[in-house]
Amino acid sequence: DGCSGECTVECGWLCEGGAVEVPDTCRQVCGDAQQTASEVCDDGDEQTGNGCDGRCAAIDPGFTCTTSFCGRTICGTVCGDGHRVYDEFKDGRCDDGNLALGDGCSPSCEVECGFVCE
């Protein structure tokens, strides 16, 4: 519910509006880099297209996200999935949908010597 046993606000929650006779209203916060039970992921912002969508409800296409033991979400692009997204648009990067060597795009998603990717 956002309130610990010691009556402190738990990580990933925002509580506001309370008074002596009225309890706080607590809600989970998307974009704080703390994944809570109702979130699929939380990469620390409310932007879509860089790992986790802006509502913390889905992992963006072309990304994979893992959650550390303390609830922090770490998202990165997936090399070899055929989606060239986010940091894969840097010079020398490619994603041809496989991890084969010698086909123009290396298993680490770098353009191989003698090839040009468009």
Image (cartoon, grey):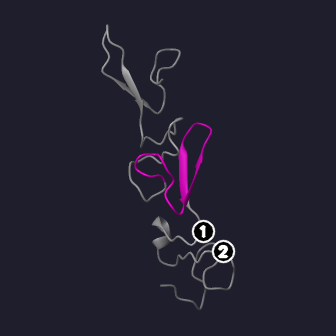
- Camera-side residue: 95 or 39? 39
Judge left or right: residue 44 versus residue 66: left
**Quarter residue 70 falls in:** top right
Judge left or right: residue 97 versus residue 26: right
Magenta stretch? 52-76
Disc 1 target residue = 79
- The amino acid marked with disc number 2 is Pro
Judge left or right: residue 69 versus residue 41: right
Callout 2: few (<14), some (14-19), or many (20+) C-alpha neighbours within 10 Å?
Answer: many
Q: Position of residue 104 (x, y in %)?
A: 61, 85
Q: Position of residue 51 (x, y in %)?
A: 49, 56
Callout 1: few (<14), some (14-19), or many (20+) C-alpha neighbours within 10 Å?
Answer: many
**Quarter residue 95 falls in:** bottom right
Q: Are marks 2 and 1 in contact (CB under 8 Å)?
A: yes
Residue 107: numbered disc: 2
Q: Please tell me whether residue 66 belongs to the stretch shown in magenta.
A: yes
